Image (tube, rainbow, N blue to C red):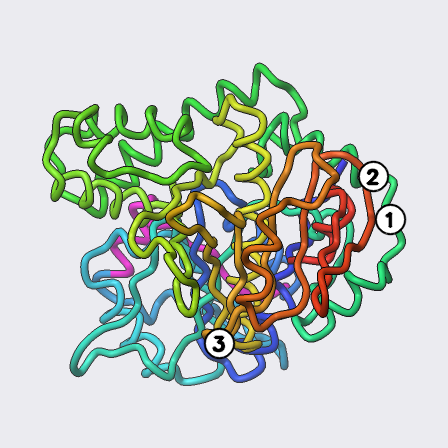
Amino acid sequence: MVSMRHRHLKNAIEEFCFADHKIAMVSGPRQCGKTTFAKMLLGERSEGRYFNWDDAEFRRLWVRTPSALIPPQQGKIVPLLVLDEIHKERFWKRNLKGLYDTLQRPCDILVTGSARLDIYRRGSDSMMGRYFPFRLHPFSMRELNYRDVLRPDDVLQALFTRSLRPEKSSLKHLDDFMAFGPFPEPFLKQDARYAGRWRQVHSQAVIREDLRDISRLPDLGRVELLAALLPERVGSIFSLKSMTEDMEISFDVLKRWLTYLKAVYYIFEIKPYSRKIPRSLRREGKVYLWDYGAIRNEAARFENLVALHLLKTCHFWTDTGEGVFDLFFLRNKEKQEIDFLIVRDDEPWLPVEVKMSDADVSPNWRKFAPMLPCRRGLQLIRKAEWKPHDFGDSQVLVAGAAEALNYFA
């Protein structure tokens, strides 16, 4: 069984925030492990306090005397103050800034939230210079097997030389991800009936509670209907026009609802990459779920699994100062496609194709590889495989996902 006591963000937060006593802002999906992670850091510190917005006594202190929340310091250990879900309060940024700016002694502060922490403020109560933001994802392959994350400059060399020893547990982990999804509770429980029930409750909570907290939508039931239709559209070009017809709502309403679903970490969207790609799509994106266990189609679920692994890698590298990493896909008007493209500082870095079982190199590589400045590509398949293929001065590695995903975050 995998321990909940290790998450890859631990070292990053200690390096970027706690070393200089800056505020650590950790956002992520509901029940991805933020509270457990925060309490783990608190337990290691031995000095500190944990507060959750749902506690009435904490709310009173937060409004009246925020300074009373600061843990007492005993000895040389700097205390840790954990503030969970405080973004539910309207003026949380103003109060947090005041608390931080009036500290009489060093105190590390960790703020967590399941809806996106929009920490940018205009004018006098800007939080700039006082914090670093981080995004905590559900479990991934590497987080189960390794205690560190490779730096981007090392990944391609390690991947294409197969420098990691294949983990025997990886095939089972991949099967478990496909069966139970990536969220800690159903993944660790290893029970299909429990996972199904957990998923129902989780989905309702995200929409009925998290979405309610950030919006004034009068009909959340209609948003739940939209959410129920999304799994069957994963992996395909997402047609706003088709969805407006199915839902019988306007284009603007649909876009607003989708924006809210992104904000509460229910879905994420990947856009087409079009720079120097002739006849590329420019607008239509693809939608994926944070909890891909809800997807019935196995091929679409596998593609979503890979998408979330790659997104987690992009977020981790961006949040830890390795550059700005974004996830796109490649598709032209002839419907030729490479499923994903990692872009580093606005330059294509690694294209990734996903196939359930086809170990033959996709013919689409011949179309897109000459257009990209990066000379390496990756094709992930569901079964065990590891074979490089040369295309002129480019190389495509066809690899089993269970092994290859260990090279990412």
Q: Which residue is mark 3?
A: 345
* Membership of 320 in magenta stretch: no
Task: Tell me the residue at 16%/81% (across/down).
Answer: 123
Q: Which residue is mark 2?
A: 169
* Membership of 50 in magenta stretch: yes
Secondary structure under the numbered disc 3 in the rendered image = loop
Residue 57, disc: none
Q: CA distance from mark 3 to mark 2?
A: 34 Å
**Residue 277 location, quadrant:** bottom left
Q: Are marks 3 and 2 in contact (CB under 8 Å)?
A: no
At which x and y percent is residue 255? Answer: 20, 44
Q: Are marks 1 and 2 in contact (CB under 8 Å)?
A: no
| Three-letter amino acid code at the position of disc 3 | Asp
Mark found first going from the N terminus, 3 or 2:
2
Q: Nearer the viewer, mark 3 or mark 2?
A: 3
At which x and y percent is residue 165? Answer: 89, 54
Question: For the N terminus, which image quadrant?
Answer: top right
Q: Residues within 10 Å of mark 3 (few under 14, many from 20)?
A: few
